[in-house]
Amino acid sequence: MISLSGEMPKPWVLNPFIQSYTELTSQKVDRKSLKQIGNGRFISAYEDQKLVGIAFCTGDVEWENEVSLSVLILPSYRKRGIESAMLRLLRGKQSSYSRTVG
């Protein structure tokens, strides 16, 4: 994973909780890699014509002061052929923490 310091994607541009995001366009993204986002850590996903953003918690979710939010930036699911079932898989992991972060 390559950390970027460039412009944040629009869905989260005003979200002060996002501390990092990662560019994964050069790596293969499949169902297995999305499953590695732990249960209760997925926050939300956004897709437009060009990219997909997946926001999730990293760190210790039980101790909120040690949690940071990360965003994976991928090419659009439609362009990469990632099934919509994978997005449903992530939504099944949606965190109750996301309801407090907003």
Image: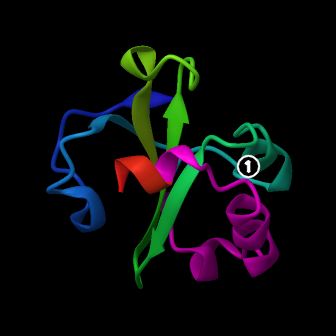
Q: What residue type is labelled 1?
A: Leu
61, 85: nearer the viewer = 61
Does residue 60 lie above or below 76 as drawn?
A: above
Tag 1 residue: 34
Residue at x 14% of width, y 56% of height: 14
| Residue 90, percent from left and from top | 71, 59
5 to the left or right of 26: left
Residue that appears at 50% across and 16% down: 63
Q: Which residue is drawn at 75% across and 42% down?
A: 39
Q: Is residue 76 above or below residue 70?
A: below
Q: What stretch is highlighted in magenta?
A: 73-98
x and y percentages locating residue 101 in the rendered image: 37, 47
Quarter location, residue 79 = bottom right
Residue under the image location 81 percent in, 75 percent down? 85
What's the colour scheme?
A: rainbow
Residue 37, image x and y in percent? 70, 40
Q: In which quarter of the image is the C terminus?
A: bottom left
| Residue 30 picture quarter | bottom right
Residue, far right: 32
Q: In this view, does 81 lie above or below 31?
A: below
Local crowd at mark 1 within 10 Å, few (<14), some, or many (≥20)? some
